[in-house]
Image (cartoon, coloured by chain):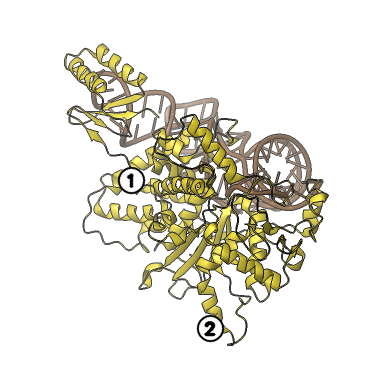
Chain colours: A yellow, B brown
Amino acid sequence: MHLTLYNTLTRRHEPLVPADPANVSFYSCGPTVYDDAHIGNFRSFLAADTLRRFVQSPLCRLAGTPDGGSAHQSPTGRTVTHVMNITDVGHMTDDDNADGSGEDKMAEAGRRLTEAKKAGMLPADVQIDPKDPYAISRFYADRFLADARALGLLVAIQAERDPSLMPRPTQFIGAMVQMIAMLIKRGHAYAVGEPGKQVVYFDVQSFAAYGRLSNNTLEALRSGEGGRVLAANQSQKKHPADFLLWKHDPSHIMKWPTPWGEGYPGWHIECSAMAMARLGQAAFAREAKASQPGTPLLLGDENSLIDLHSGGEDNIFPHHECEIAQSCCALCRNPARGSFARMWVHCRHLMVEGEKMSKRKGNFHTARDLFARGVLPGALRLELIRTHYRSQANFTMQGLSDCQRMIDRWRRVYDAPPGDAAIDPLTHPVLTAFAAPLHEDLNVAGAIAEVNTWVNGIASPTAQDAAVMRHIDAVLGVLDRPVPTATATAIGVYVGGAQPTDEVEGLLAERAQARKAKDFAASDRIRDRLAAMGLTIKDVPGGKVEVGRRA
RNA sequence: GGCCGCGUACCAAAGUGGUUGAAUGGAACGGAUUGCAAAUCCGUUGGACGCAAGUCCCUCGCCGGUUCGAAUCCGGCCGCGGCCUCCA
């Protein structure tokens, strides 16, 4: 058994065969930081995170590796270097003409922040200059990282120690400029306009494999444009599908000097440049070993820059199509035979209560909104990863509470007292049953079913069971999430964000008296009153009352 | 207009040719427990006949086809969604 994934590039299930099974390189397209990330964004990031967790788990076997693919048999184990960008360059709101016009999204975010501040929607301690795009992107990036860490996104947790794992394009303008220069030099890009005030386009006709990922041909793209591409905006391009690499525009809110003029980079070049900068060393080291000294160092046909690349389904075209084109044309000896990444995985979108998520329908949720309503990060994570990543998932509040209950039942096993519990993850029957569906295109739903079947059969969990559950949760990442600490008083145990107040404490004491006197009508009235305050109670062993918040 | 995907029982969601009347979780109902709840445990949840073992009928959007056999393969239709413009 070995891990197979659906490769968008070939439209087939294929084994994941990394260039170096001891260190898998993985690049994921991350968030833009003009606003808070919503749960749909997080579904995609969490799918990537779950894949990454499984690949680095000893439960995962990879094809074509000498030791049979089990990570733990290698002295150093298997590491996954997962990189996710945080896009902090402002792009344009109005992209009708693909030339970059309209309002800069960062400027728009600044305006929104100003309004929020006026309306008192922002905490008083937030000091940010809405005219400073760097301050805006930092503000939203920090909020994203906090949400991501709560949800157990390993890359965000690791980035606290190694920020290079979450690169920001404003720090890589130099790398982008180099790559653009290389594309011009190799005849895959061209600059138009008078010197110093130029726009640089990628020449799609120079790359025979353009369209391979999205299954579009240049003709199909042309016929599919349906009148939406204005001829007036196309005059300088050689082909309507040619896309922007650099734009001279001194009026842009973020701008940098380059040989083509002061301006800003196109939408796609950042990922190519950053993947190259952070993950490309290994591929070029392999190439240097294999090639003649003195020849220009370009990747050969079998040598991809990275092993895995992921994103949401909307990234397939144009973003990833363009990434492949740029990267291969800049880095490969035979561009049309390159693929940039060996494996391309794409996550389908999330629906909410059966409908497309939208602010107008009122079914638009950010992670932090849900947290503020008392949703626990573990439950949200499970709800977002439990559906197969290539199915359209339906997020529901019902599903969220289902997940919370599942987690509560699993935690009983997870929290069993530890002890002498040596288990072999490769042969343990529960773990092999859990890992089997995951090897088949990361079938998380199937794996969860195995966990439930197993947990149902446990009368009282042992140290061994706890050890097994830890292996499981290293992949799912739902138990190792922050849970609000319970506040205990003489009479109550407050959980799930509920806090003791004099009023509540008084009611609990009154209820205890009523119950003692067997005045159950009075006792039930108090429960109703607490319910009206948004609190649920239940009697727990020890004579105390557990107080929680109503979902 | 072009390219692509999906539709499973009350809900969510696995399963992609036979042991599947359909995993798993929730929900509902019955029982144990509780003053009542909550939590937990046991059982039931397409229909008919039967005390039962069981037998028969109808099921995986709809219609048709391939096959000894289909939720699973093929065709048509309907519905939903994605991309073709920034978007996970």
In the depicted view, which residue is nearer to us: A99 or A503? A99
Q: Nearer the viewer, residue A297 or A290?
A: A297
Which quadrant of the figure contains the C terminus of chain A? top left
Q: Is residue A487 above or below residue A391?
A: above
Which residue is at a point 53% across and 33% down the rendered structure image? A115
Q: Residue A434 versus residue A117: which sits nearer the camera? A: A117
Mark 2 or mark 1, which is nearer the start of the sequence?
Answer: 2
* Image point (42%, 66%), residue name: A79
Q: Chain of mark 1?
A: A
- Quadrant assignment, res A102: top right
Q: What amino acid is found at the position of numbered circle 1 in the picture?
A: Gly
Residue A397: x %, y % from top left: 47, 33
Q: Tell whether A367 sits left or right of A112.
A: left
* Amino acid bearing label 2: Lys
Residue A420 in view in this figure: yes
Q: Residue A218 at what x, y percent from top left?
A: 78, 59
> Is A509 located above or below residue A261 in the figure?
above
Q: Is residue A14 visible?
A: no
In the picture of the structure, the residue carrying the numbered disc 1 is A457
Mark 1 touches mark 2? (CB < 8 Å)? no
Q: Which mark is residue A331?
A: none
The numbered disc on residue A289 is: 2
* Mark 1 nearby-residue class (10 Å; few <14, some 14–19, many ≥20): few
Task: State which chain disc 2 sits on.
Answer: A
A473 vs B76: above or below: below
